[in-house]
Image: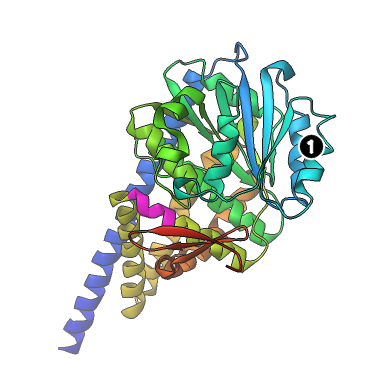
Amino acid sequence: MRHNQNVDEVTIAIIVGFLSIATYWVRTALMVIGAHLERRACRRSANEDITFPAVSIIIPARNEEHRILRCLESLKALDYPSDRLEIIIVNDRSTDRTAHVVASHIADIPSLRLLTVTEPGSGNLRGKAGALDVGIRHAHGDIILLTDADCAVHSQWVRAHVAQYSSEDVSMVCAYTLIAGTDPFARIQAVEWNTTNTMASAGVFYRQFLGCFGNNMSFRRDVYQLLGGYRAIPFSVTEDLALLQAVGRIGCTIRYLCSRESTVETEACSTMTEYLQQHQRWVHGARALGWRAYTFVGTTLLYWIGVIVAIGTTNWVMASAIILSRIAADIILNAPSLVQLDRHQLLWWIAPTTLLFSVLELSLPFLALSRSIRWKDQVFETSPHVSISLEEGA
C-alpha cells in the first residue's frame, strides 16, 4: 500500500511539474513573440529623415540637488536643433538647492526653463502627476518627452523618439530605461527592469497595456489635451501606467522602442528598503491591470505549486527541472533586448536574477496589503475607495 502511495505522489508531482513548466513557457513564448514583433514594428515606423518637430522635455524635480547635475549634463549633449527644443524642469516644492542648481545651468543650456510649484496638487493632480501637468501646460512643443531628474538621456534620445512620429498614426512612444551600476544589486535590478520593459513592449504589440517607465516616454501634446491630461485621468501612484492606458483606450497607436539611442539611464535602488518601497508602489499600480494582473499572478502561483509539490514528494529531479526551465525561459526572454541594447554583460546575471526575484515574488502579496505608499518624501494613503496624499510628518 505504501509503495502505491509513493507512486501516486510521484505521478502527481510529475503532472503538476510539467503543467507548471508548460504554463510558464507559454507565457514566456507570448512575451518573446510580442516583443520581437514590436521591435520590428518600431523599425518600420521610424524615419531617420525627420523634419524636426518642436519638442518639449518635461522633468519633475523634488529635492534633487545631489542627483540632477548628471541629468543636466546629458541634456546639454542632446543632438537636436536647439531652436526646436525646450527643456522644462518643474521644481516641485523642493526644500533643498534644486532650483539653484538648475538656474546655474540656464546660461549653458539656452533651451532650459525652470518652473516652480509652491503648493501641493489636489484631486487627480497629487504627487508627480501634478508637477508633470504644470510642465505640460506650459510647454509649446508638438511632441512631449518625459524623464526624471535622476536620469541621464542618450545624446540621440530626442531624435529616436521623434523618428517614430513620422508615422502620423503614432500617438505615444515608450522606451527602455536602463539601470546604472556594476555592483551585484544594481546588476540584478538592471535585468529585472529589462524583463519588465520587454514584457511591457510585448503588451503594447498585443494592445494589452501592461506598463511603461515614465522616465522614458513621449506623446503628442494634442493627444494629452484631448484626454484632458492628468486632471481628467484618475489618480494613480503609477501615473505613467495610467496615462499609457488612457491613450490606449481611445484607440491610439503606441510604440515601444528598444534601441540604444532611445534609452534613458537611472540609478539603481541603493538599499533593500528603497527597493521594496519601489515595488510596493508598482504592486498597487498594477491593480489597474485587472485580469491581466491576475493572469500573471496565477501563472506564477502555478510555478510555485509545482516547486512545492516536487519538494514535498522529494522529487528533486522535477524540482530542479522546474527551476531550470524558468531560468532558461527568462534567458530566452531577455537575451534579444540585452543584445539589441549592447548590454551583453548582463546576460550572465539573468540566472541569479531569476532565482532571487522568484523568492521576492512571495513577498509581493504582502506589499499589496499596506495602504501607505511612500514616494520621495510624501506618503500616499490608499483604500479601496479613496486615496489621499499626506506630506511627510503630517
Is 160 covered by the magenta stretch? no
With respect to residue 230, does 14 lie above or below?
below
**Looking at the picture, which amino acid does disc 1 mark?**
Glu
Q: Residue furthest bottom?
A: 2
The mark tally for this picture is: 1
Give the side of residue 209 with respect to residue 88, left or right: left
Q: Residue furthest front?
A: 119
Tell me the quarter of the image containing the C terminus: bottom right
Give the side of residue 370 with respect to residue 379, left or right: left
Which residue position holds label 1? 73
Q: Residue at x 59, y 55 (%)?
A: 189
Image colouring? rainbow
Question: From which residue to which does the magenta span run?
Answer: 284-289
Is 256 or 216 nearer to us in this picture? Answer: 216
x and y percentages locating residue 92 in the rendered image: 65, 47
x and y percentages locating residue 59 in the rendered image: 64, 39
Q: How crowded is mark 1: few (under 14 residues within 10 Å), some or many (20 or more)?
A: some
With respect to residue 286, does 262 lie above or below?
above
x and y percentages locating residue 316 in the rendered image: 39, 74
Give the side of residue 42 with respect to residue 308, left or right: right
Tell me the quarter of the image containing the N terminus: bottom left
Is 119 or 140 nearer to us in this picture? Answer: 119
x and y percentages locating residue 46 in the rendered image: 53, 19
Q: Is the magenta stretch mostly helix, strand or loop?
A: helix
Instruction: Give the secondary structure at mark 1.
Output: helix
With respect to residue 309, does 144 lie above or below?
above
Q: Which residue is drawn at 62% across and 26% down?
A: 56
Q: Is residue 106 visible to the viewer in this orientation of the structure? A: yes
